[in-house]
Amino acid sequence: MHTLSNVEFMLLQMIAEHRQASGYDIMKLVEQRGYKEWANIGTTSIYVGLKKLSDKGWISPETSDEKSGKGPTPTRFVLTEAGIRKLRNEILDSLSSTRERDNRFDLGLAALPHIGKEEAVIALRKRLDFLGQASIKIRQKYESQGGASLPLNVRALFLHPFSLIESEQAFVSRLIHELLEEASRHGQNY
């Protein structure tokens, strides 16, 4: 179980990306990036998430002198040291151990600039191991229930995740390869 909701994870990312952000800034980014559609993030959840992150000590409010419009002066949030550590840990966890087609993995991908390439490669290699283990477990269950002799509709319930996992493994392998190529162009060795 994740200690951060997807909304809280996304909020930490956006605040880190912009060094500081208000709820309104984040709402605009959520709309621009389509988070509402693929991560089920709405306006209310943004403000509830900011409150929770603040209560946990992972972000800190800063009152801004900037004012646009007639409303109150916006409160901007910045990451605390604990928030930076939490974000890094969540990125690494989401990249290394979420199931195939999990929005959490997509959120981890969106946050790649907040960790080093070496850390990303290590987390993604762990993801390959995680996916391999998941595939083994599904295959064992498939075989124990009759394997190829199962009715098509039952086989499909096993074949579908096999296919998704294989595709995910190929994607992660390509991503690792690209990260390593980028690192070698910039003179980093792994």
Image (tube, grey):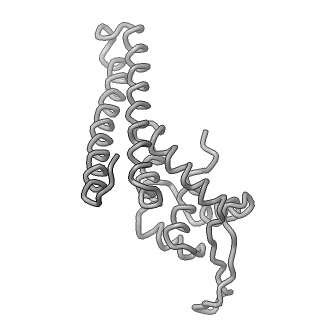
| Residue situated furthest right in the rendering | 55
- The image shows residue 75 at horizontal and vertical percentages of 66, 79
- The image shows residue 161 at horizontal and vertical percentages of 36, 29
Quarter of the picture holding the N terminus = top right
- The image shows residue 31 at horizontal and vertical percentages of 45, 68
- The image shows residue 2 at horizontal and vertical percentages of 60, 43
Image point 65% across, 62% down: which residue? 81
Q: Is residue 41 or residue 62 the one in the foreground?
A: 62
Image point 53% across, 76% down: which residue? 25
Q: Is residue 51 above or below residue 4?
A: below
Q: Is residue 156 above or below residue 121?
A: above
Left or right of 147: which side holds 144? Answer: right
Q: Is residue 73 or residue 44 the one in the foreground?
A: 73
Left or right of 174: which side holds 190? Answer: right
Count of numbered circles in the view: 0
Q: Quadrant of residue 122?
A: top left
Image point 60% across, 64% down: which residue? 46
Q: Quadrant of residue 132?
A: top left
